[in-house]
Amino acid sequence: MRTRPIVLSKTCPYCGARSKAEAKLPVPANMPAVEFNLDNLGALIQKQSLSLLLALVELLPYKTFACRKCGHEFRLESRTARELVGAMLGSMQPAPAIKPPAPAPRARLPARKPAKPASPAGHGKDWEAESLDAMLDYPVDHKPKA
């Protein structure tokens, strides 16, 4: 983008003819010579970018329009510009942050259930495990016979 002269046109409030002013605005280099008709704001808003429109709004109060027919000069003024800009800024909301893509979930093995103690085969519910002392009860007093 580079700054180029743009012709601004507006209806003269004194005689009704076209009046013109020139402004330097940042426009794309490939855009042909442009004239902004300030009487047809709907088309201007639809065709131009937001940054260009904001630059135009900032610049307009300082431009002097000259009527080619009657020779009168005038400026545009807006008593509501501050309120409009305040409302615009107040209506802006933060853009949602772009989250990086979540890593693919890892395949998890199914949770294992704790192993149940195996009951000895052939024994019913009344079976009770013997203590190791009873199983390995060797009399210490007796020597093995040789």
Image: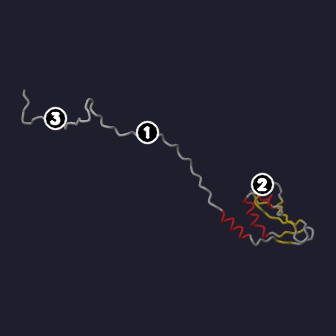
Secondary structure beneath dot 2 equals: loop
Tell us which disc is closer to us: 2 or 3. Answer: 3
Residue type at the position of mark 3: Leu
Q: Residue at the location (20% across, 36% down)?
A: 130
**Towards the viewer: 91 or 114:** 114
Distance CA(mark 1)–CA(mark 3): 41 Å
The residue beneath circle 1 is 110
The residue beneath circle 3 is 136
Residue type at the position of mark 2: Ala
Tell us which disc is closer to us: 2 or 1. Answer: 1
Q: Is residue 127 left or right of residue 69?
A: left
**Crowding at mark 3 (Cα within 10 Å: few <14, some 14-19, many 20+):** few
How many labels were placed on the picture? 3
Q: Residue at the location (66% across, 63% down)?
A: 91
Distance CA(mark 2)–CA(mark 1): 63 Å
Secondary structure beneath dot 1 equals: loop
Q: Is residue 34 above or below residue 72?
A: above
Q: Position of residue 15 (x, y in %)?
A: 91, 70
**Crowding at mark 2 (Cα within 10 Å: few <14, some 14-19, many 20+):** few
The residue beneath circle 2 is 29
